[in-house]
Amino acid sequence: TLDAEQLKCVKDLTISRPAVGKVSFHGETDCTDLDFERLVRLEIGEVLVYPEPGMKPPPGVGLNKAATVTMYQCWPPKDPKLQDAKGQERYKMQIRQMTEDKKATFIDYDCTTGVWKFSVDHF
């Protein structure tokens, strides 16, 4: 358990849900009065930070800051074209494009493990 002073500057805060994913916030985060259960929603294939309308602070404040997201169980569709390396590479490029369309930075995706990793400047 952290005391009040330590809660003000938690370095590289990571919020995770086993077998679903994790969000690692870059730098120091003031965790005073943050209700993580309410502010971060991690589901298979989806991460929402400040999911309720009107609760998101300006970029750089609270959890609305740079982070790296790792999602598990993001399996490709069961498609015979994805069985070979070429098909898997094409699917990885689709995931890259989808990631960039959402204004995030693609880091990696692996068809065989279902792990998708990307970063954001803010939520």
Image: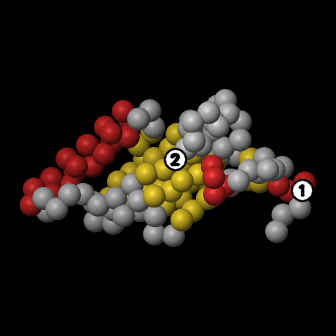
Residue denoted by label 2: 48
* Mark carried by residue 107: none
At label 1, the amino acid type is Ala
Disc 2 is placed on an element classified as strand
Q: Is residue 19 above or below residue 30?
A: below
In the rendered image, residue 108, in percent from the top left (x then y), is placed at 39, 51
**Residue 75 visible at all:** yes
x then y, percent, for residue 53: 57, 36
Residue 15 horizontal side relative to residue 83, left or right = right
Residue at mark 1 to residue at mark 2: CA–CA distance: 27 Å
Q: Residues within 10 Å of mark 1 (few under 14, many from 20)?
A: few
Position of the C terminus by quadrant:
top right
Residue to which mark 1 is pinned: 4
- Locate the N terminus and report the quarter of the image it occupies: bottom right
- Taking 73 as reference, is 120 above or below it? above
Name the residue furthest left. Answer: 80
Residue closer to the observer: 9 or 123? 123
Mark toward the viewer: 1 or 2: 2
Question: From where the camera sits, is residue 9 visible?
Answer: no
Q: Position of residue 68 (x, y in %)?
A: 54, 49
Which residue is rendered at x = 48% and y = 50% of the image?
A: 47
Residue that protrudes farthest toward the front in the picture: 53
